[in-house]
Image: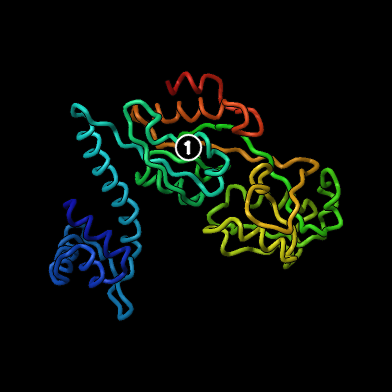
Amino acid sequence: MELRQLRYFVAVAEERRFSAAARRLHIAAPSLSQQIRALERDLRVTLFERTPRGAELTAAGLVLADRARVILAEVDRARRDVQSAGPGHRETVTLRVCTMAERVLDGPLRHIGSAVPGAAVTVTSSPGDDAVEAVRQGRADAAVVWNRPPEHRDLDGLVLGSVLLGIVLPAGHRLAARPDVPVAELGSESTVMFPWSPFAGVWQRTVDHLLPGGAQQGQVVIEPDLINSPEAMLRAVAAGGGIAPGILGVAEQMDVGGIVVLPLDPPLVLDLEVVWRPPARPAVRRLVDHLVRSVDDPGVLVTAPRRPPGAVRVMG
């Protein structure tokens, strides 16, 4: 099994057509097909079902697709690390930041590209679960994500701190003049929510807090455009679609009129975590240390950072 064959295999798995993958790889389609056949002979399995609709991964192909992405990411990472070891070079570190976390951490992230000693940090935005998968598959070195569900706790991580979620109401809502909104008075409200996937770590927790009596059929309205535009949920509230959760101090700053953002009673608190794949190389440790120091500055997070004892010392 050659690295070249793995790259070819991943291209076909992602494109779902040999012709499209061949164009992406800048090789002839027959040559690509021959290499995939050779890989299948070497592994003694069928990786693709060839159908008129394209190339569909078999069960064995699905297993290899996950492993191949990790292997190729590790090879690319090793290449970067070796190249950065030369004189005058800085290690490249990639950080994924989940949706809305980039707004909470706007200050710490603004100059992070050159703030980590000996490293050049590249930051990209990504939905929560996608950011975790990027770290797991080696496509990113670290990620800042909302509370992780149990299935994502195979990665190392620590809690940077917490944020308070309030409630977003239409400006004319019956509760809009209150200093805060009792959760007990929200039981009959339609609730506009972001998609469950890829935010599984916080979706159910948020709905359970806003509707502790349980959501009735049709009471939760999913806003499909939220992944690309968090403002979509607030616009739905302004248009009368219901109420919605919103990060206090952030939702008010979005350019959406006709809404009121108020604290909840009792409050809803969500954690922000930084996660990485063990063992963390030194540049990743320095990145985590930088994030920890940055969020200790007053005003970055609403509640004090909560970390395991000695976490900062371990990462030093």
Question: Residue 275 at x, y = what percent?
Answer: 47, 37
Question: Residue 227 at x, y = what percent?
Answer: 53, 58
Seen in the image, is 104 located left or right of residue 171? left
At a point 79% along the width and 60% down the height, the residue shown is 189
Quadrant where the C terminus sits is: top left
Q: Is residue 7 above or below residue 48?
A: above
Seen in the image, is 267 located left or right of residue 103? right
Q: Is residue 140 above or below residue 12?
A: above
Question: Residue 306 at x, y = what percent?
Answer: 60, 28
Front residue of 63/148: it is: 148
Seen in the image, is 92 located left or right of residue 30? right
Q: Residue furthest bottom?
A: 52
Q: Is residue 176 above or below residue 117?
A: below
Residue underneath mark 1:
109
> Which residue type carries mark 1?
Leu
Front residue of 290/11: it is: 290
Residue 141 falls in which quadrant of the image? top left
Question: Residue 71 at x, y = what percent?
Answer: 27, 46
Front residue of 306/101: it is: 101
Q: Residues within 10 Å of mark 1 (few under 14, many from 20)?
A: some
At a point 59% along the width and 33% down the height, the residue shown is 300
Q: Is residue 203 above or below residue 29?
A: above
At a point 61% along the width and 48% down the height, the residue shown is 202
